[in-house]
Amino acid sequence: MVGEEAIMDPAGLKAIGAGLAVGLTGLASGIAEKDIGAAAIGAMAENEGLFGKGLILTVIPETIVIFGLVVALLIS
């Protein structure tokens, strides 16, 4: 209708923000884990004793998704 302003729904904007928080952190974590995982496999191919360090370094980016989930829960 002409002349009426669009009313933004706060609940909808909160849902979009929460979805972006989880989605973007998940995407960034996946990209980081891909690079770290490839490097860890290359290091383990040369020295099998680096398995523990490679495993720990591969898991670290997953904590970013947990932070994104916490932010999403705080938003909603």
Image: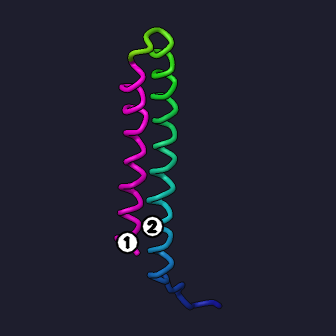
Rendered image: mark on residue 36: none
Task: Identify which amino acid the numbered label 2 is placed on.
Answer: Gly
Residue for badge 1: 75
Which residues make up the magenta segment? 50-76
Q: What element carries label 2?
A: helix
Q: Which of the pair 18/7 is nearer the observer? A: 18
> Quick one: which residue is furthest to the top in this view?
46
- Measuring from the top left, give residue 55's x and y in whole percent: 42, 31
Label 2 Cα crowd, 10 Å radius (few <14 / some 14-19 / many 20+): some
Do residues under tags 1 and 2 come within 8 Å of each other at their CB atoms?
A: yes
Residue shown at 38% from the left, 26% from the top: 52
Q: What element carries label 1?
A: helix
- Measuring from the top left, give residue 70's x and y in whole percent: 36, 63
Q: In this view, does 12 lie to the left or right of 72?
A: right
Residue for badge 2: 17
Q: Distance between the residues labelled 1 and 2?
A: 7 Å
The vertical placement of 49 against 58, above or below, is above
Residue shown at 63% from the left, 90% from the top: 2
Task: Identify which amino acid the numbered label 1 is placed on.
Answer: Ile
